[in-house]
Amino acid sequence: MSGRELDAAGITDPELRAAYLRCRRLNARHGRTYFLATRLLTAERRPAVHALYGFARWADDIVDSLDPAVGVDARAAALARLREELEAGLREGRSSEPTVRAVADTARRYAIDHRHFGDFMDSMRLDLEVTEYATYADLCAYMHGSAAVIGLQMLPVLGTVVPREEAAPYAAALGVAFQLTNFLRDVGEDLDRGRVYLPADLLAAYGVDRELLRWSRDRGRPDRRVVAALRAFEDLTRQVYRRAAPGIALLDPVSRPCIRTAFVLYAGILDAVADSGYAVVQRRAVVPRRRRAAVAADGLVRVAAARLARRRASRRGARRVPLRPKPPVAPPATGPSAPPCEEVV
C-alpha cells in the first residue's frame, strides 16, 4: 500500500497508517487471488479492503495454526483475547492491536454494522469446536459468519447504485461462493487440520466418508466415489455463483471491475479443480499464472473505462457517487441479520 493510497483515503495518523500497512501485508501473503483483484479498486478504497481482509486473515491464522505446540485451548484463549480487543476497538475507536485498530477505523469510516464482526468471530470459534457438518444447511449456518458477512462488510466500501439492502443478498451470496470454492480447493489441507467442510450427507450420497477421504489423501490415490462427490460439490458451488452474479451490476461502476475480476478468478479455481480430475484431496488446484494475468488485464481495461465514464459524467455536471462517505456518529440501525444462505440441493 503506497502513501498515495493512504493519503487518498484521508489516513494521516502515523500509527494508523502502520496498522493499515500490516493488514495489507497479511492480505498479500494469504489471499493472492483477491489481493490481485483489490489492485483494481480506486486508491482511496484499497486500505479499507485490506483492513477487513487483513483482520480476517489474522483471526484465521490463530484458528488454523498447525504448530503442534499450540493446542486448541491456547488457540481458543488467543481468539477470545482478539474478540475482546475487537469489541473494545469497535466501541472506542482505538486499539493497541494494529489489525483491530485498522478494522475499527474502517468500520467507523464506512458505517459497517458491528454485528457482522461479532458473527464472524462466532464462526471462527466454531472452527475450534466443530470438525464436520452433517448437512448443507448446517454448513450455511457456519458460513453466514465466516463468509456471507465478509461480503456485507465489503458492500459499504464498494458502494452501490441501489439502496444497500437491495444489494446485500448478492454480496452475501458471493462471499459464500468464494468460501465454497476454498473448501473444494483445500479438501486435503483441511483434512490435515482435522476438518471436513463438505457436508456429510452430500458425501454419503456417493458412498464417501471421512475415512475414505483420509485414505485417499494418505495414499495419494483418487477414488471414483470421491471424484463423484467433489463434482457434486462443484455443481452446488456454481449454483451459488449464479445466484450472486447479478449483484455485480448493483455496485458502484468503479468497483465493478474489482469484484468481477475476483468472481472470474475464483470461478477459475473450480475450472482448475475439474481440469485436475478432482485430485484436490491429494493436492491443491491452482489457476495458471497466464490465466490470472489475462483476467487481471481485462479488469484493468474495465477500470479505465469506468473511470473515464465517471470523469465525463462529472464534467457534464452529473451527480457523482461519493467515493468516501462522511462517517456518521454510529453505524445505522438495521433489521435482523439475513439468513445464512439458501438450500440449493
Image (tube, helix red, strand yellow):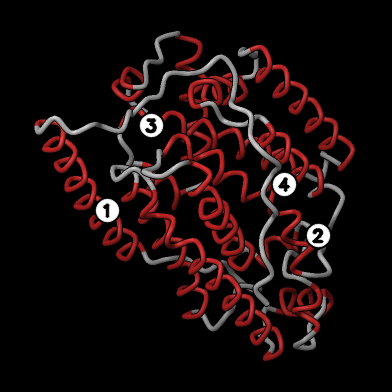
Label 2, label 1: how far apart the Cα atoms are: 38 Å
Q: Secondary structure at mark 3?
A: helix
Residue 284 spot, x, y in % from top left: 56, 66
Q: Which residue is mark 4?
A: 64
Viewer-side label of 2, 1:
1
Instruction: Please determine whether, in this image, residue 229 is positioned above or below residue 198.
Output: below
Residue that extends furthest to the right in the rendered view of this protein: 73
- Mark 4 touches mark 2? (CB < 8 Å): no
The Cα–Cα distance between marks 1 and 4, rounded to whole angstroms, is 32 Å
Percent position of residue 242, x then y: 48, 69
For label 4, the SS is loop
Disc 4 packing (10 Å; few <14; some 14–19; many ≥20): some
Counting residues from the start of the chain, the first of labels 2 and 1 encountered is 2
Q: Are marks 3 and 4 in contact (CB under 8 Å)?
A: no
Question: Which three-letter amino acid code belongs to the residue tagged 4?
Answer: Asp
User: Which x, y percent locates residue 226?
Assistant: 70, 83
Q: Earlier in the sequence, mark 4 or mark 2?
A: 4
What residue would you read off at disc 2?
194
Nearer to the camera, 21 or 10: 10
The reply to whether dot 3 and dot 1 touch (C-beta < 8 Å) is no
**Other-residue count near label 2 (Cα within 10 Å), few / some / many at <14 / 14–19 / ≥20:** few
CA distance for labels 3 and 4: 28 Å
- Residue 45 numbered mark, or none: 3
Residue 12 figure quarter = top left
Whether pointer 1 and pointer 4 mark residues with C-beta atoms closer than 8 Å, the reply is no
Q: Which badge, 2 or 3, comes first in the chain's sequence? A: 3
Name the residue tied to disc 1: 299
Work out whether residue 26 or residue 94 is closer to the camera in this orientation and state it.
94
Amino acid type for the residue under numbered disc 2: Gly
Residue at image location 35% in from the left, 48% down from the top: 258
Q: Secondary structure at mark 2?
A: loop
